[in-house]
Image (spheres, grey):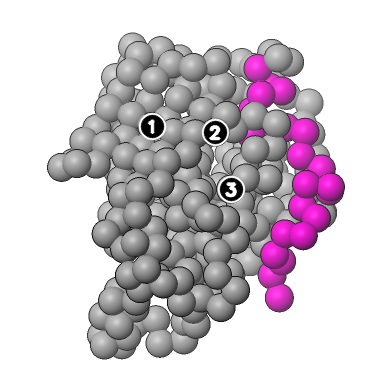
Amino acid sequence: MAILPASAEYGIWFRRTDVTGRDPMVPARWDAVETAPLCTRLVNHAGVSVSTVEHLMAALAGCGIHNALIEIDGPEVPILDGSAAPFVAAIVSRGVRRLRAPIRAIRVLEAVEVRSGDALARLDPAEALEMDFSIDFADAAIGRQHKVLDMANGAFVRELCDSRTFCRQADVDAMQANGLALGGKPGENAVVFDGDRVLSPGGLRHADEPVRHKMLDALGDLALACAPILGRYTGVRAGHAMTNTLLRALFAQPTAYRVVLCDAVMAARLPGMGVGRADIAGLPRAA
């Protein structure tokens, strides 16, 4: 997989280099999302898809990248260590080119909320992107966790990007019984919990790593809005599908948002602004 620079207003696109005879270009856009278990999958008009895009999309948004072409030779973005850190480390170490064009952002004007059972996702007006996330799992090693972050000043890189996806041992057993995840190893691409135990070697990177990872996922899914969001995102037990449903609800309500050109003050508070090499010291990198 390779991340290539793109011009202003290009947006984020994937190009499947292994596809012939069909359109290989897949847009990283909210209305190209197809429901998939446990990940975000994008599908174009020709049925060409790219799965598990959320960690890469979070890395791009968290590093302030709004235009890029991602070339990929298969249907799924590499999971790597289960976090966005290897992507972030690679992007920041290579450098980001600032374009001589204004940044467009989506300002939330009215509250928009979606619910499913005891889960909800909501956007409220705010001057910059803020995130508020709560989770509640029966496993004692996870339990209830809550975190609030202002995503300005590189907060994603320092606070969230190294938090890994997680699952329960019962989920791993069920997948392997069905011939799935046979090559996965705890600690290499996910944190595995079993009741009150953390089974992955080395334990957790943060005491609240699960809720941090949920926020990472949400940022990646919100990045499919095709522009930075100026608003407060609240997630309660929310997952990929619910965040996408929230974006669909936002764009179905024209009075709830406005596309704006960011002035210098607004741009300075976007995720990724001010991130430098010092911020990636110690981050896990791809092998």
Among the 4 quarters of the image, the one containing residue 206: bottom right
**Going from the N terminus, do you reach mark 1 or mark 3 first?**
3
Q: Residue at (29%, 19%) from the top-left corner?
A: 253
Q: Residue beneath label 1, please?
A: 234
Q: CA distance from mark 2 to mark 3?
A: 10 Å
For the record, the magenta segment spans 266-287
On screen, residue 161 versus residue 20, left or right, reads right
N-term mark: 2 or 3: 2
Amino acid type at image mark 3 = Leu
Question: x and y percent of residue 275 in the render?
Answer: 76, 39
Q: In the rendered image, which residue does mark 3 sit on?
A: 160
Q: Which mark is residue 195?
A: none
The answer to whether residue 10 of the structure is visible from this angle is: no
- The rendered magenta stretch, by its main secondary structure, is classed as loop
Query: Which residue has dot 2 on it?
Result: 149
User: Amino acid type of disc 2?
Assistant: Leu
Does the magenta segment cover residue 148?
no
What residue type is disc 1 on?
Thr
Q: Is 97 or 193 nearer to us in this picture?
A: 193
Q: Is residue 270 above or below residue 275?
A: above
Q: Rate crowding at label 3 as few (under 14), some (14 to 19) or many (20 or more) other CA atoms within 10 Å.
A: many
Reply yes or no: does residue 272 show up in magenta: yes
- Mark nearer the N terminus (1 vs 2): 2
CA neighbours of label 2 inside 10 A, class few (<14), some (14 to 19), many (20+):
some
In this view, 272 is above or below 111? below
Q: Is residue 137 left or right of residue 3?
A: left
Label 1: how many Cα within 10 Å (few below 14, some 14–19, many 20+) = many
Are the two marked residues, 2 and 3, in contact with CB atoms closer than 8 angstroms?
Answer: yes
What residue is shown at x 35% (from left), y 14% (from top)? 110
